Amino acid sequence: MNNTTKRAYFLYVFIIAFLVGIGFMFYSFYTHGEEWASMTANRHLYSNGQILNAGSIYDRNGERLAYSENGQRSYHGSETVRKAFLHSIGDTSGFIATGVQTVYGNQLSGYDFVNGVYNLKKFGRGNDVTLTLDAKVCKVAYEAMGGRKGTVAVYNYKTGEIICMVSTPSFDPLNKPTDIDSNSAYEGVYINRFFTGVYTPGSTFKTVTAICAIQNIPDLDSRRFNCTGSYNAGTGIVKCNGVHGVLDFEEGFNNSCNCVFAELAIELGTAKMTQTANQLGFNVKDNMGETPISKSSFNVSKASPSDLGWAGIGQYTTLANPCHMLTLMGAIANGGTAIKPYYINCITTPAGVSTPIGTTTKSETITLDSAIANRMVDYMRSNVVNKYGDSTFKNLQMCGKTGTAQVDNGDPHSWFVGFSMNPETPYAVVCVAENSGYGLDVAGTISNTVMQAVCFPK
Ligand SMILES: [Zn+2]
């Protein structure tokens, strides 16, 4: 090798090393750029760990819920609205991991891959986010929860738009309580119970056992059951909430008779009950955009007959997530087709260009035959007409199921799941009020209040 070729050789090596280096830099920028730009240490966007110059957040009617002004993050003028939106918007410090300000922090702060923090520098602020939620309805819902812990949500089962999503306890992001970490009233305050909560479902799970029975017992409607106040499963007793005597399946569902549903679950067996629960989204991971939804679980692999009876009435180890139960109600209401709920409508740049985020999408986690869904509509409508009272859910043509879920610590969880079957008001509702007693009295009343606000706005 002469000197000239040697020099050329080294030059090639240097050029290759340089290109590899540049390539690695671009790769890192591409994979970590968003992280770097929005790191809390970055003074352009944050100060003292607080998000400052982010864009605004609006409700579905253009009401401004959060904004930045003079280097401060601020929120809606009503304290109740601020509390009602704490879990959907998030706090200023990012403690609420599932809030828009945390999950969509990059978009709100105006970061984009090509221009970095271009939007922020050019316009002095980031992008805006518009939610599908209604501030008036969420305020009504927060007040209706009446200081109880739990969640209430309503979504349009045709489009997937969530109109109301409230999780309690909450706090005012402009006035965070000083005893938040020591006062039990704020237990679990940073989680959105709608996304992350899992609860013993109690009798709301009878909708699942009912679907399994419709799928597997052809003469279900001509069957007769006899409730003596308890069902003896051999390995143990399943107690009923009353002594219902001889009744058919529909009457058993109306009265939420534990004897009828324990008998059915045991007769159907672990394999069929598990198959139906899985088809309906139990034991399946799901998410809403960037946000994971806690998994509902149904596991009777080690259950004795009486355990299976208890599982069939929503007790034993069965757990349900409120977002999942709402989607299941949507599937029943919508002729078997489950539409995924979403609550972020679009992101709009300071130049006015909007990108839709949530769209109407079919859920992949729930499979339900349309004929079975329609039969369930009839049974759930019958619950309201024959048991809960149609006047309890005035003008809604409501279909529903209550739950009074026994728990180890304290009073039962009060549940209501249901929907309006009126095509003019295609909304489904879920409410869980922790340790609050009888399902219809508490969760049923809250559900009606919120559904009235959604379907008949004043
Ligand atoms: Zn009974």
Image (spheres, rainbow, N blue to C red):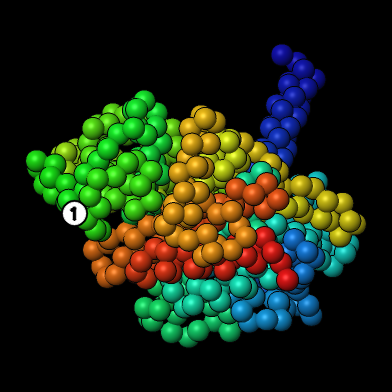
Which quadrant is the C terminus positioned in? bottom right
Q: Name the secondary structure under disc 1.
A: loop
Q: From the viewer's side, name the closer residue of 359 and 50.
A: 359
* Numbered label tally: 1
Residue at the far top: name it. Answer: 1
Q: Residue at x 75, y 30 (%)?
A: 15
Q: Position of residue 134 (x, y in %)?
A: 69, 64
Q: From the viewer's side, name the closer residue of 17 and 183.
A: 183
Q: Residue at x 69, y 64 (%)?
A: 456
Q: Residue at x 75, y 61 (%)?
A: 60
Q: Position of residue 272 (x, y in %)?
A: 31, 29
Decide: few, some or many residues near mark 1? Use Cα within 10 Å; few <14, some 14-19, many ≥20. Answer: some
Is residue 440 visible from the viewing direction of this image? yes
Is residue 48 visible from the viewing direction of this image? no
Q: Position of residue 198 (x, y in %)?
A: 39, 55
Q: Is ligand 1 closer than 8 angstroms to the Cβ of mark 1? A: yes
